Amino acid sequence: MADEPESTKDENRSSENKAGTEKNGLPMVFVLKTKDDPEITDPDAYKTKQSTQPIKPSTSVPRRMVNLFLRKADEASLADWAMVLFTLIIAASTIVYTVYARRQWREMNGSGRQTDQIIEAANKIETHLKQTVLDNKQALADNKMAIENALKENRLEFSGALEQNRKSLEASTSQSNKALNASIDISRLDQRPWVLFPTFTLSSEPEDGKEITVKITLENTGKSPALTVANQGILLMSSIEPSMTEFSSVNVIDGSSRTVVPPGSGPTEITFTTTPWIVPKATIDAYKNKTWKLYIHAKASYSDAFGKQHWTTACSYHQSGWGMSQWRFCSQGNDVDHEEQEKKQNPN
C-alpha cells in the first residue's frame, strides 16, 4: 500500500485539531499562546515562563460538548431544574441509605454471629438437659427394677414364711386334734357301755308240737348307760357248731323307745325272749339222743351317750339232759365292736 503524501497528513491533523478529537478518541490538551507572548525557541526559556505564568489548559471535555451543555442549560425550564435537583436528592439519599444499610448489615452480621453463638449455647444446654433427662430416666428405671426385685424377693420370702407358718400351724393343730381326739377316744372308751349276755334260760325241753323260747339276760359292764338297745336272737338245731348268723343291721340311733341298760356290777333284770319255735320231730329225736344240740345266736345293738353305735354277739349251746339255765358258749361268734382296733385301722 503506497504512503500518503505529506500534505494529506497535515490536512488530516488540521481537521482533527478543529474537531477537538483524535481518531483514537482520547481527549486533547490545548496550549494557547497569545500574540503578546514572545516566541519561545529555547526550552529553558519555556520552563521559566511556565514557572512564572502557568499555561491554562482547556477543559477536558471537547468544546462542542461544553457548548451543547451550556445551550441546553439556557433552554432548561424550572421543571427540568427541579428534576435535576430531585435526581441529586435521590442520588444523595441513595448514597446515605447505602452507607446506613452497610452499617446495618455489619451490625446485623455481628448480631447474627452473636445469635449463632447464643443458638449454639442453647443447643449445648438442650443437649445437656436431654442427656440429664435420659440419665434420670435410666436411674428411675434402675430404681424401679431394684424396687420390683426387692418386692418380689420380699413377697417370696413372706409367702415362704406364711407357708411355713401355715404348715407349722396345721401340723400343730393336727397334733393337737390328734391328742384331743385320742384323749376323747380314751375317755369315751373308758366310759362307754359294754352290753353282754351272761345267762340264757330255756323255757322247756323240746317236744313234738310244743313251742320253746330262750330268755336272755342283759348285763352292762361299762361306766355309762347303753341307750336304745335292740335285741335279735334265733334258735337252731345242729350236729356241729353252725356258722354265726349274719343279722340284719339295725339303726339304733333313732330307736328312742327301745331298752336302756344301765351300768351295773352284775346281771340285770332286763331280758329279751326269742321268737317261739316248734322243733321238728326228727330233730327232737336226734337232740334227745345227744347227737344234735340246741344253739342260740343273739345280737344286741345299742349306742352310747356320744351317739356312737355299738354291738355285741353271742353264740351258746344247750344239750339234752342239762338244766334249763345251763348253757355253754361256742368256740366262735362271741364278739363285741372293736372300737379301739377300728380307730387304729381307720384313723379318719
Image (cartoon, grey):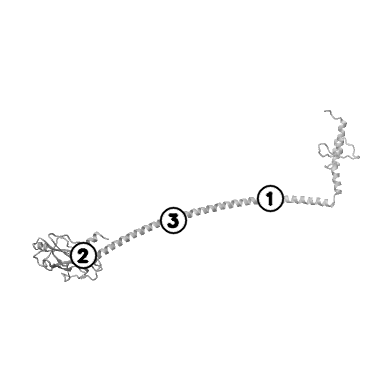
- State the separation of the CA atoms marked 1 and 3: 62 Å
Question: What kind of residue is marked 1?
Answer: Trp
Question: What kind of residue is marked 2?
Answer: Trp
Q: Earlier in the sequence, mark 1 or mark 2?
A: 1
Tell whether label 2 touches label 1 (CB within 8 Å): no
Tag in front: 2 or 3 = 2
Q: Earlier in the sequence, mark 1 or mark 3?
A: 1
**Mark 2 residue element:** strand
Q: Residue at x 56, y 53 (%)?
A: 126
Question: What kind of residue is marked 3?
Answer: Glu
Tell whether label 3 touches label 2 (CB within 8 Å): no
Q: Position of residue 310 (x, y in %)?
A: 22, 65
Q: Is residue 56 visible?
A: no
Is disc 2 surrounded by few (<14), some (14 to 19) or many (20+) residues within 10 Å?
Answer: many
Q: Looking at this view, is 336 or 143 the one in front?
A: 336
Residue at mark 2: 311
Vertical side of 249 occupied by 8: above or below: above
**Mark 1 residue element:** helix
To which quarter of the image does residue 225 belong? bottom left
- State the separation of the CA atoms marked 2 and 3: 66 Å
Give the quadrant of the N terminus: top right
Residue at mark 3: 148
Q: Residue at x 75, y 51 (%)?
A: 93
Q: Is residue 285 visible?
A: yes
Q: Residue at x 29, y 61 (%)?
A: 174
Residue at mark 1: 105
**Mark 3 residue element:** helix
Name, please, the residue furthest toward the right.
36
150 with respect to 193 (left or right) = right
Tag in front: 1 or 3 = 3
